[in-house]
Image (cartoon, rainbow, N blue to C red):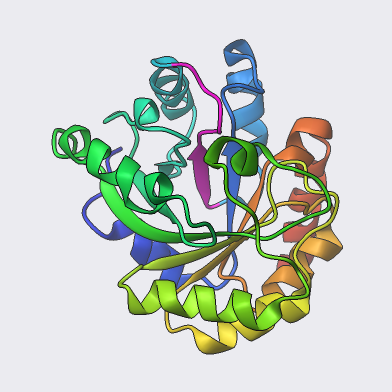
């Protein structure tokens, strides 16, 4: 199944509780995709994100092709570099690292990517990517050579997200980073969402149903979970049971 223009963006806008499962090809064996996707399809997940900070050329496409064999959910690229772009996916988060000041990740990589994207039918989702500190250095921070925004600089986080919207971004992504020690505080999510008219994505450090629900209640339109599934695939069972409980209620 191939998604049409703006279909992915509209799906995020339509559902205030979307959930993306992030698959990092650098952290998963491709032979495990079939069993992993069986669990994803049985959960409340609505989107699949594929990508990472350090993925070799050609690997992302191989993973996307395999993932698409086992799901009808939209597969969206979450690229750490131009080499991860592939037409086999449905869409791409066109990430501008607005929390940093490295021109390569504000516009440089994007110029480099245009010729490749023009050769695809990917739905392009301009996304203001905002990295929030989480107590340890993330791979994004190391590779992009940028500093995350301190958690106690709440107004700076709010203003950065709003600036992204005013620049024309269609999504704002608050990211604590892969393997974050703790998720972004609900107070920050709430205050950022209050200022935005576009969907808000939140990811990093979410490892429990309570933290997931807390992010939704605070205003997240789409939550991204990756490490929690890598460390504990039983988390899928918790999500499925939670979904069944909501239905029963």
Q: Main secondary structure of the magenta part?
A: loop
Rendered position, 6 above or below 180? below
The image quadrant of residue 208 is bottom right
- Left or right: residue 133 versus residue 80 is right
- Expressed as whole percent of the image width and height from the top left, the position of residue 171 reads 43, 66
Q: Residue at x 75, y 43 (%)?
A: 137
* Residue with the most extreme top position: 31
Question: Can you name the residue that lies furthest to the bottom here?
Answer: 194
Depth check, front residue: 89 or 134: 134
Quarter of the image that includes the N terminus:
top left
* Residue at 48% across, 34% down: 71
Q: Can residue 218 be seen in this snapshot?
A: no
User: In this view of the protein, which residue sits in the foreground, 170 or 38?
Assistant: 170
Q: Position of residue 14 (x, y in %)?
A: 43, 72
Q: Position of residue 203 (x, y in %)?
A: 65, 55
- Reply yes or no: does residue 54 show up in magenta: yes
Q: Up-down: is 22 above or below 182?
A: above
Say above or below: 21 vs 84. below
Q: Which residues are magenta?
A: 46-56
- Which quarter of the rendered picture does the C terminus lie within? bottom right
The residue sitting at 59% across, 30% down in the picture is 24
Residue 179 picture quarter: top right
Q: Is residue 95 magenta?
A: no
Q: Is residue 224 left or right of residue 79?
A: right
The answer to whether residue 73 is above or below residue 147 is above
- In the rendering, at what x and y percent does residue 151 appear? 76, 69
Residue 48 in the figure: left or right of residue 90: right
* Residue 228 visible here: yes
Q: Nearer the viewer, residue 205 or 123?
A: 205
Residue at image coords 82%, 50%: 207
């Amino acid at each position: 199944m191939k998604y049409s223009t703006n279909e992915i963006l509209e799906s995020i806008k339509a559902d205030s509780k979307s959930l993306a499962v992030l698959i990092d090809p650098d952290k998963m064996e491709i032979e495990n995709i079939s069993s992993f996707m069986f669990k994803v399809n049985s959960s409340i997940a609505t989107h699949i994100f594929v990508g990472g900070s350090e993925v070799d050329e050609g690997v992302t496409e191989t993973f996307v092709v395999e993932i698409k064999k086992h799901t009808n959910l939209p597969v969206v690229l979450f690229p750490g570099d131009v080499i991860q772009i592939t037409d086999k996916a449905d869409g791409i988060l066109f990430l501008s690292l607005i929390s940093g000041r490295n021109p390569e990740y504000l516009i440089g990589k994007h110029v480099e990517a245009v010729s490749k994207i023009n050769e695809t039918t990917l739905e392009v989702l301009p996304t203001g990517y905002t990295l929030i500190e989480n107590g340890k250095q993330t791979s994004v921070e190391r590779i992009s050579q940028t500093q995350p925004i301190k958690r106690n600089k709440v107004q700076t986080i709010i203003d950065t997200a709003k600036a992204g919207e005013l620049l024309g971004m269609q999504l704002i992504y608050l990211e604590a980073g892969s393997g974050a020690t703790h998720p972004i505080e609900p107070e920050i999510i709430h205050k950022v969402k209050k200022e935005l008219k576009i969907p808000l994505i939140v990811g990093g450090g979410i490892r429990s149903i309570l933290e997931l629900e807390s992010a939704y209640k605070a205003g997240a339109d789409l939550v991204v979970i990756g490490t929690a599934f890598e460390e504990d695939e039983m988390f899928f069972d918790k999500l499925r049971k939670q979904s069944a409980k909501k239905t029963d209620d």
